[in-house]
Image (spheres, rainbow, N blue to C red):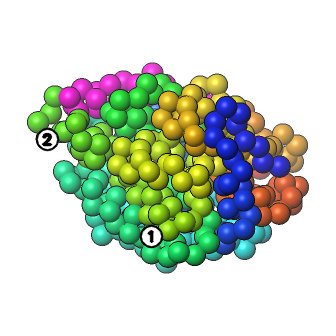
Amino acid sequence: MVRCVDGLGDCGPVLEGLRSGTLVGVYVIASTKTSTIPGISIAGASPEATLYTPALDVEYLYLGMPVGMNIIPVTPEGLPTPAVITRSCIELGKVPAVIVDAGSAMQPKVPHITLPSKVVGGRIDVSLALPPGTARELYSEAKLLGRRMAAGRAHAFILGESMPGGTTTAMAILVGLGYDALGKTSSSSPNNPVELKVKVVEKAIHRLRSEVRCDPSNPLGVIDCVGDPLHVALAGFATGALSEGSTVLLAGGTQMVAVLAIMKAIDPEALKVGKLAVGTTRWVVEDRSSDIKGLIKEVSPSTPVIFTELSFSDSPYPGLRMYEEGYVKEGVGAGGTAVAVEVKGLKLREIKEAIYREYERLIGLGAAKA
């Protein structure tokens, strides 16, 4: 069962668009060196390993096991990628998946689309996020891709992402664009490293306001200075697809508020068409260390948030039950993909059974915590 967060926009048009449209999963990947700051992200076995998580995530999504490296991306505690949820949903729901590389540190060894201006993001506390002008190019390229993939047909796009460190860069983007977002984004850890993220973002914002190469008056200049390649590409794709009449479900947590903020700054009319929503998990909505509802109320209160009530409290696997303790929560479009296939008619029980079967397969491969 899916639910809509009270006090935000009307879910009805998006739910109808998901029911009637042809579902297509689009999963954008990128890397940012911000993820290598010790303690920022647990979306990898080590800080350095987080750079390769996006490519491994989508290889697993396509093939059931990565091939670039013979490992499933895991947290330091041994919990595998939330792509376990996404893969189970797209296999069960027969949803085609398209991979878009906006700046992955490792090229995924599965069919994918590469944006011409792809680049790995810099470490935002000490350097530019992107070479000047790159954000504009990524936005334009992704917008064109969204338009061409939609091409006037009744598509319903699930727009997901994989980029460790993204909740930190999303916070910097939001603060850089003038929003009260400091300390309000989520984390894949049950112990959200809010103080560390805030320190990183404060250093980034100081650079934004003092470094001659940064332009705080230009939204795309803000992203070049303190953002990353991912969020601007997501914003471009969403805007392009919406311009062709498609429904777009931003499949992610608090990071997707940064996508809304970029869209509002560059193409504000895209937020008014009524076919855009954020799709996420119950774990993100209930997370007390972040504030997705408050952030969206500030940035785009007319944008609804739809979440799946997926729960692993009755899972036979302790590794999955750790989601109920605040681990992982979201990623690789997990929540939005689950929302979309539920709206299409799959029962939550069927989805959970598929996830449990997939998790059991990973245990058999030695790639998941029993």
The segment highlighted magenta reads: 190-209
Residue 210 sits above or below residue 87 on the image: above
Residue 92: x and y in percent read: 77, 69
Residue 235: x and y in percent read: 43, 53
Q: Which residue is mark 1?
A: 147
Residue 143: x and y in percent read: 39, 64
Residue drawn at x 59%, y 55% is 275
Quick one: SS at disc 1? helix
Tell me which amino acid carries mark 2.
Answer: Arg
Q: Which residue is mark 2?
A: 213
Disc nearer the start of the sequence (1/2): 1
Residue 211: x and y in percent read: 15, 33
Quick one: SS at disc 2? loop
Q: Is residue 207 magenta?
A: yes
Circle 1 or circle 2, nearest the eye = 1
Q: Is residue 8 magenta?
A: no
Residue drawn at x 43%, y 24% is 180
Tell me which amino acid carries mark 1.
Answer: Arg
Q: Quadrant of residue 342?
A: bottom right
